[in-house]
Amino acid sequence: MDSKYPGDYIPKYYNIARKIITGTFSANFNDYDLYFEEFRRQATILKKEALAFPSNTDDYKNRYLSAGALEALIRMADKLTRVLDRYVLNTNSKRAAIMVNGVKISSKADMQLFDLAAEQIGLLRFNFSQSRLKTNEADLALKVLMSYAKETDGKSLAPKHCLLIDIHSGNILTAKDNRLIESVLLDSCSEIGQIWKAL
């Protein structure tokens, strides 16, 4: 299985954006424009803050790339409105990983999705990578998300309520009830496990 992150991508560069996005959406405003106004405001602040650091440092990259992610999210406003209409969103503070054929996979969701009766019915994860998703990558990430819900809370979530927001492509992807994806996940982890044993 290909590495989730290409060699020139460091996930920590989007930590600021992730914290702003999840915290803002957790406010559950009735006026959706408030979300995107806040993202625009924060992006402007981050770009100004980035100028205080050399461009090859983590301090610069985290601020500059996080600002870009916030601006990309603003361009998704029309699509995101459908998610905001349907769910109550809360930041997910649980850290967890799942084991698949002896391989530990990080599987934390960014947000929990609730219905209007306050019952958790779904999970959401943001993908910040600027690289185009590889074949099966989104489906695998969503399969892991569903497995995460089952192992951490004992919840069997409907695939349609497990969302991956690919910020830079502007797409909102949903899980599929696809046994082929499960087979790909199992086979990939078995292969990784065998490689580790051989090291």
Image (cartoon, rainbow, N blue to C red):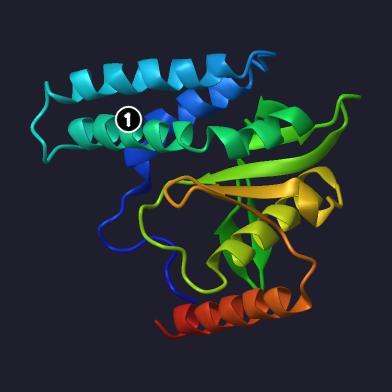
Q: Position of residue 137 (x, y in %)?
A: 54, 67
Residue at disc 1, secondary structure: helix
User: Could you tell me if residue 107 is visible in this image?
Assistant: yes
Amino acid type at image mark 1: Ala
**Residue extending furthest front?**
78
As drawn, 180 above or below 84: below
**For mark 1, what is the residue?**
67
As drawn, 29 above or below 82: above
Quarter that holds the C terminus: bottom left
Question: Residue at point 77% right, 47% down?
Answer: 161
Quadrant of res 14? top left
Q: Is residue 10 left or right of residue 198?
A: left
Q: Position of residue 71 (x, y in %)?
A: 38, 32
**Residue extending furthest right?**
117
Q: Position of residue 193 (x, y in %)?
A: 54, 78
Question: Residue at point 51% right, 38% down?
Answer: 76
As drawn, 71 above or below 193: above
> Dot 1, how many residues are within 10 Å of its Cα: few (below 14), some (14-19), or many (20+)?
many
